[in-house]
Image (cartoon, helix red, strand yellow):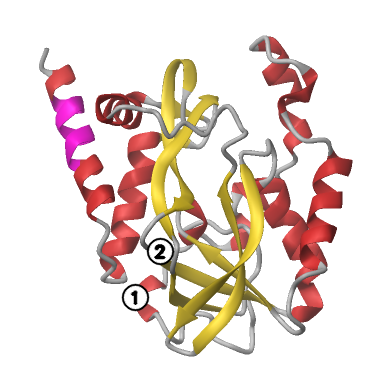
């Protein structure tokens, strides 16, 4: 974060609710660090994108960026743990997409093969309100590489620029959209499966229930309405209580 500008000037309610990038797990994350773990789980070596594939994608996509600083649209865990340094954060809305709980996790982040987890992806829909983070133009290469290692580790997303609208007006922001060619993007999950995965999935980053609780907390702080998030959260909590009491 910038030392000479308050990143939370527009949203003081977020102060203390976003993990300092320098303290983030994702700051120094390398997908290759998990190769041995994935091999032990029986996954093939191509469980992730190669560093060369990911870097080629990053450079290709960023060629399309507008001049100046880089804006990043966040709709899920990036809202509280971006991992990259940012100069400014603002609430913003993107039309044509929605927050969808269709990312099934069996790789150990927030779920396993035995007890899958579930997280949100950005998919086609009526609109999504989240946050946009501004990365200083002088730091784009370094900070976007951190972002790509985190979001594009396995290819479950497609990186694209979208039109986001904030109080400062319209802007182009990079975001990560559900890749329906990826096996872990599961738009066919039933409601019961979604609830179970959220209630029981757990991994090295925490539980899927903690994930949706964090998301709900940030939506509440920003006065963002998302009925699906709060409905799934209530149902998952009820599932957990029922399971706990037999």
Q: Which residue is identified by label 1?
A: 13
Q: Is residue 236 magenta?
A: yes
Q: Residue at x 84, y 59 (%)?
A: 59
Q: Which mark is residue 159?
A: none
Marks 2,1: beta carbons within 8 A: yes
The stretch drawn in magenta includes residue 173: no
Asked which secondary structure carries label 1, the reply is: helix
In this view of the protein, which residue sits in the foreground, 221 or 229? 229
Q: Is residue 134 left or right of residue 188?
A: right
Q: Nearer the viewer, residue 35 or 171?
A: 171
Give residue 134's quadrant in the image: bottom right
- Give how far apart the Cα atoms at labels 2 and 1 are: 8 Å
Question: x and y percent of residue 169 in the render?
Answer: 49, 89
Say which of 151 and 139 sits in front.
Answer: 151
Q: Main secondary structure of the magenta part?
A: helix
Quadrant of the rendering where the N terminus is positioned: bottom right
Question: Is residue 115 found left or right of 204 in the rendered image?
Answer: left
Magenta extent:
234-241
Classify mark 2: helix, strand or loop: loop
Q: Is residue 19 above or below residue 87?
A: above
Q: Residue at x 80, y 79 (%)?
A: 138
The residue that mark 2 highlights is 17
């Amino acid at each position: 974060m910038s030392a000479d500008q308050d990143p939370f000037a527009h949203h003081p309610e977020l102060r203390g609710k976003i993990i300092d990038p320098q303290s983030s797990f994702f700051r120094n994350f390398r997908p290759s660090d998990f190769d041995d773990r994935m091999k032990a789980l029986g996954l093939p070596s191509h469980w992730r994108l190669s560093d060369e594939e990911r870097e080629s994608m990053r450079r290709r996509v960023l060629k399309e960026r507008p001049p100046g600083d880089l804006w990043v649209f966040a709709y899920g865990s990036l809202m509280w743990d971006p991992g990259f340094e940012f100069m400014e954060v603002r609430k913003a809305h993107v039309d044509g997409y929605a927050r969808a709980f269709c990312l099934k996790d069996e790789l150990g982040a927030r779920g396993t093969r035995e007890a899958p987890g579930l997280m949100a992806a950005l998919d086609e829909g009526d609109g999504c309100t989240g946050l946009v983070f501004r990365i200083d133009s002088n730091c784009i290469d370094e900070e976007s590489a951190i972002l790509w290692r985190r979001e594009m580790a396995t290819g479950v997303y497609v990186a694209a620029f979208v039109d986001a609208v904030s109080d400062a007006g319209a802007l182009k922001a990079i975001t990560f959209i559900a890749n329906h060619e990826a096996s872990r993007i599961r738009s066919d999950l039933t409601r019961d499966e979604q609830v179970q995965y959220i209630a029981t999935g757990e991994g090295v980053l925490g539980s899927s229930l903690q994930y949706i609780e964090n998301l709900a907390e940030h939506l509440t702080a920003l006065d963002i309405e998302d009925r699906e998030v709060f409905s799934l959260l209530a149902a998952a909590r009820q599932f957990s209580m029922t399971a706990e009491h037999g």
